[in-house]
Image (cartoon, rainbow, N blue to C red):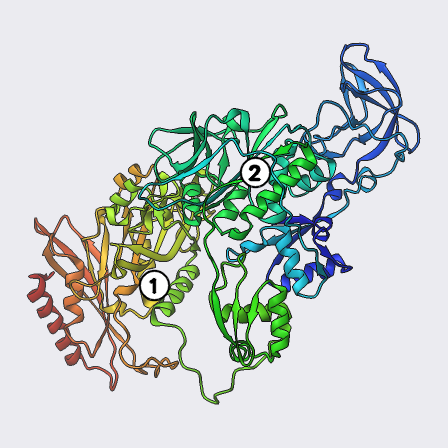
Amino acid sequence: MKFTLSWLKEHLETDASLEEIVERLTLIGLEVEEVTNRADRLKPFRIAKVLEAEQHPNADRLRVLKVDTGEGDPVQVVCGAPNARAGLVGVLGKPGDYVPGLDVTLSVGKIRDVESFGMMCSERELELSNEHDGIIDLPADAPVGMAYAEWAGLDEPVIEIGLTPNRPDCTGVYGIARDLAAAGLGKLKERSNEQVRGSFPCPVDVTLDFGDTKPMCKAFGLRLVKGVKNGPSPKWLQDRLTAIGLRPINALVDMTNYITFDQGRPLHVFDADKVHGNLVVRRGKQGEKIDGLNGKSYELDDTICVISDDNGVESLGGILGGEPSGCTEETVNVLIESALWDEDDIAATGRKLGVNTDARYRFERGVDPNYMMPGLEYATRMVMDLCGGEPSETVQAGSVPDTSNIIDFPYSEIRRLSGVDVLPAEANVTLKSLGFWISGAGDTVKVAAPSWRPDIEGKADLVEEVVRIIGLERVPFTPLPRTGTVGQKVLTTGQIRRNKARRALAARGFNEAVTWSFIAKDHAELFGGGSAALALANPISSEMSDMRPSLLPGLLLAAQRNADRGYGNVALFEVGQVFENDTPEGQKMVATGVRRGSAKLQGSGRHWSGVSQAVDVFDAKADAEAALAAIGAPVDKLMVSADAPATFHPGRSGCLKLGPKNVLAVFGEVHPRTLQLLDIEGPLVAFEIFLDALPEPKGKGGRSKGALNVSGLMPVQRDFAFLVGKDISAEALLKAARGAEKTLISDVTLFDIYEGQGVPEGQKSVAIDVTLQPRQKTLTDEEIDAVAKKIIANVEKATGGTLRG
């Protein structure tokens, strides 16, 4: 919401400075986002006088001007404006000045072989109005050389506040002035509610026709003003609209825009001669269309409220006027509309059609219902002041709803909810200054909220109003009491695991990414999703139609976007939610990472010591195991299987399981078919860690890491080579060896797999390194041999393998 300081003072008698007003606005909840000044962008432009105007030697429509800038010798300017003449006082832009209306920076140039050292500007080029038929023509006594913005009074601050949705009363400058007056920063000027007497019946009637369906319009007021003379609006009105970023059009349209921002009451004006028959407010029909005043065409249906006549649809109710009945400078008879629209329907229609207007912004938040007809009177007076004309009597369809809400308000609630001691008299003055009605005496009174405050529902709202106006600085600061004990754990197990996973992956060279929770339907289907239950009812776009079943699509596409911009060796991770179904249990927390190109742990790109290798499945497995170890998973007890999802390359992927069914992670090289369907270039490896699948830690977790379990005795290493069938996995052999003697065997690693000469057909040689770690005494040869025999026996039993001779 934007407004100028002088505009505010039209409704507020105050001597407060700009700084005081800005500070108080923020303190009462109308947070000031920015204070700007139009003079800043117009500061370089100076008043200049044309001394000579000669015909351009090479162009019939151009003139060569000698211009007095007030500084030194006159400058030469080539100008094509029809009103360029000797003696004209206008506005000059010099080389280096930025012209906002043209979005160009001036420079010295040649126009038809004649040099030009600047530009005489029109109002549209300086974004002062839409006038561009000629350059600015100032009074003859305008001081040459003076800054134009300063002379024209354009150096006025424009205040922009950020409104919360619950404050529709402050979508108009008058409502903002009311709040400031209540906060003690001045006196509110009462607005006139004088009625305009109509001199004849309104020839156009209006009907609300919604049948048995929910009414989309609560009430509708209408009046004809005949014999108006439309044209450009007065300069004061144009200046106010341009200051807040609106383009002046004509007096009738500018008037409705002004009242929208001044009173928070959107209106619409129809050219009465273009309206045929009476107006009917109804639901749209399938197949109907309307050409809006914004130059766009919209297809309608029965979820959209329209205003129609005998010709068809004339306007989108409460959102946008139609081009066929729009007012132009030829308009002589005008219908003024002031209506109350259903807030939910306005919001739904705006979203459906993608239309954002100032009227929609206010109607979907809720306008003052009791100001519907006074707003029509206000607009009638303004039309007659600007354009003349003779008004008709008003007609009204529907009825203004009763929004009164009587609240029993104990004054003790102020102290209970805010901690502030406020006397009943002070609370009464504050509420009355905001427009509240108070009845009764004693400790509890009855309070009625004004019609322009639909957000006031109960006692707590009244306390909030009192406290924000008297000053939040009066709320006492009360420190929390010290308990004297160590604080308990605040974060949940899930939060701790997510944080640890992030730290672990960042430490391994990954960059964290945040991708959309919505993906395209075909991408969702590729990763096991795409069900109807997870399709969005109102997607942002067709590429964001379904909730994601996996983080991989977003990360893979992000990696490709980096590659498209020259950063092919990237490692990205994300910790976020995925959706298996539309139940709370179907929402899972996952940590996912991808590596592309040569983005290995030790670094990426070319190096003097050799050619960088591409990422492979073992990089993904190492990343998954590191993250699992960081969140407390028993990595040494995990099983590795090759049954990864179909999105991974078979034979170059796997699963990490805690037991035969509980999958903690999947990893591997992304399947070429998956990359092709996503239009992504490889190689790419990835992993997914299912954080919710890890069981809760047993017992009470403490801050201590436990005793250091280190033996002072030297470990013993023994190598074994087994002949096993080709179909036997190395993991099965390693597991069998580990289980042979758990008290002594501290580690088992695979260091060789061989097939070929010396190995029987259909078999392979698997060599492992077993580390024995004694705890109490040094092992004898006999004890070591006994453990070796157990290892051989376990492997033979589990895999059918024999010790290779």
Q: Is residue 648 visible?
A: no
Q: Is residue 296 visible?
A: yes
Quadrant holding the C terminus: bottom left
* 514 and 728: which is toward the camera: 514
Q: Amino acid at mark 1?
A: Ala
Image position of 299 with respect to 786: above or below:
above
Q: Residues within 10 Å of mark 1 (few under 14, many from 20)?
A: some
Extreme residue in the right direction: 72
Q: Is residue 250 left or right of residue 108?
A: left
Image position of 48 with respect to 778: above or below:
above
Q: Is residue 548 left or right of residue 510?
A: left
Q: Which mark is residue 626?
A: 1
**Label 1 vs label 2, nearer the camera:** 2
**Secondary structure under badge 2?**
loop
Q: Using the rendered view, name the quadrant where residue 378 is placed.
A: top right
**Secondary structure under badge 1?**
helix
Q: Amino acid at mark 2?
A: Glu
Residue at 83% in and 35% down: 46
The residue that label 2 is drawn on is 393
* 572 and 470: which is toward the camera: 470
Residue 11 at x, y = what percent?
Answer: 70, 53
